[in-house]
Image (spheres, grey):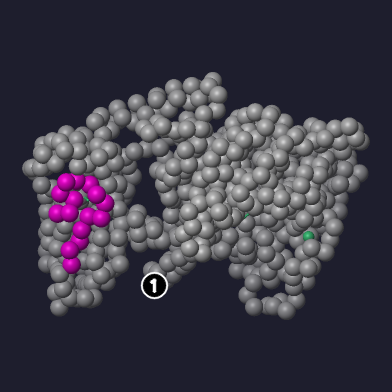
Amino acid sequence: MDKAKKTKLNKDLPEQNTRRRFLGQSALLGLAGAGVLAGCKEEPAVTKASAAASATGTAVSKAASAPVGHEVAPGQLDDYYFFSSGGHSGEARIIGYPSGRTLRRIPVFNIDPMVGWGITNESKAIIGTNPDGSLKYTTGDTHHIHGSYKDGTYDGRWLFVNDKLHSRLARIRMDTMECDKITQLPNVMGYHGTFPDKCDPVDPKINYTTRVFCGGEFHIPLPNDGHDLNDPSKWGALFTCIDAETMEVRWQVRIDGNCDLVATSYNGKYAATNSYNTENAADQAGMMSAERDACIFFDIARIEKLVKDGKFTHIGTSKVPVVDGRKAANQDPKTAITCYVPAGKNPHGVNASPDGKYFVTSDKLSPTATVIEIALVEKWFNGELKTERDAVVAQPEIGLGPLHTAFDGKGNAFTTLFLDSQIVKWNVDKAIAQYKGDKSVNPVLDKVDVHYQPGHGFASMGETKEADGKYFNSGNKFSKDRFLPVGPLHCETEQMIDISGDKMRIVSDHTAYPEPHDAIIMRRDIVKTRQIYNMDDFPNAVKPDNAGITRKGNKVSVRMMSVAPAYSIPEIRVKKGDEVTITLTNHDKVEDLTHGCGIPYHNINFIVNPQETKSVTFKADKPGVYWIYCTHFCHALHLEMRSRFIVEA
Ligand code: RUQ
Ligand code: CUA
Ligand code: CA
């Protein structure tokens, strides 16, 4: 046992450039021919990928010229990716749109035994561990997911998603659709809204996302270390900026009131958050006592100048610079870093219009949306506008319980009405004309019932300057009678609405496992994923010359490879009490050929995709024989793909 035992990959295994050809050459010819492995790919992986890419291009241009069709026939690809948060499941999700077919779940703040998220050493390091190696948190609550931008539209590089529960921001790399970083926000509780910037505030050449802004919702003692427990008047909330590239916290702003959702301007100069608790109250009645609340604008360049000039403090043990954005410290607009624009009562969402001109808050407890012109906010910051309220250019009455607003890129806005259970379509220019005094215009163009009680609403490409006005998705919080009953827990409804015509038209209901909040609908040509990993991206990749079993004291390292239908080590022997690390590299190069690794009674379960490496570390404390087996159907001999794990007493 002490000497290294090297095991060569089985030389009999044929070269595998396709799964079908491999099966054709394997021992069980008949099974392959009988189509046992449905979905086998004919073409070599590389050709397949480029073929798919060009097919994508063709189909998208076709879809652009044809009227909006909603059916996606078997074998046809969707026109859009729908990236959704998963609420208290702690995950993110990918859905094909308009079909509504679930394509993938992306575990982020949760544990997922299918892929091994929260089980492998690599994923644990991303999620964050305690000194004993256990996960710091195993729960999360994702609400808002947004893509990185370039030139005012998605660049297909990253998705960012928040965890409201433990105040963390996660980044998902879009080439593999996996979370690669998670950052904990200091001195914040209930981190809710999140939005990437679209451009640098000073350098127009940096016309892509380099910052992510995060809104802290709950007031807490600062620092929250046991002091000021009984004096809520001393509690506060912070607005946070995270570096998109390094995922480090850049700075925070102490504000009056709280943050909720976040939006960013197309010119990079401003971020904004709606504030429903401008009262700084610690109870519900208090949070609803003011007739108006606010939308708080942040001047990013000025904040970063303060930080650069050292005009900041620290809170508690955190090293993050905190600047003062409270009203008292920002009396002079010309030096202010924050502008508190009065909005309706307890506003919920804040959304930027695709023409770059307006921010719209949906005023939950008033029947209105508040339209704020960004050029006027800029005037205020230049000392050229009398009051903050003068930046409001419209406040149309749209219905009861407005929560979120989306845009079609043609000057129309679509707001979810939670209490009315409706979506209202209204015209921004008409709302502005009405606000100016033209009594003859009615900005409300159409209303449609949804089923039931919509929360988030978002349109295809609606949060980019390429908003295309095809689909609006109503994320409904209740589904009651819309689907077969499945017990007391109901799923939620994603209702797809065709907004290409004058009248909105509901075209389908999709189910959603609770509970998605926000999502984005992204054109498929923007998304470029890889189908196979690059083995060299994994520093711990197992190759024939470093494979085998080695021991150092009671630490045993098992370096193993998988090639369908076998692991490279048929028998692994350890002693009771050993700490075992299994590193597994999948040497299959065939698209879609994933292997799994389950170890009975050891709580280990994970997969390795083609050319991927993962590792797990655990204690072997129960003498006996344990069959390590492949959990992911990979081959006609999938059931036989096993290795004996023997723990000696
Ligand atoms: S919230 S239903 Cu978490 Cu986005 Cu508005
Ligand atoms: Cu390898 Cu199933
Ligand atoms: Ca309020």
Give left or right: position of 228 versus 546: right
At x 59%, y 31%, the residue is: 470
Above or below residue 324? Residue 435 is above
Instruction: Name the residue tied to disc 1.
Output: 132
Above or below residue 378? Residue 295 is below
Give left or right: position of 426 versus 191: right
At x 11%, y 39%, the residue is: 30
At x 77%, y 64%, the residue is: 287
User: What range of the chain is rendered magenta?
Assistant: 626-640
Q: Nearer the viewer, residue 76 or 602?
A: 76
Give left or right: position of 60 versus 414: left
Q: Nearer the viewer, residue 42 or 647?
A: 42
Q: Main secondary structure of the magenta part?
A: loop
Q: Is residue 443 magenta?
A: no
Residue type at tag 1: Asp
x, y percent for residue 190: 62, 62
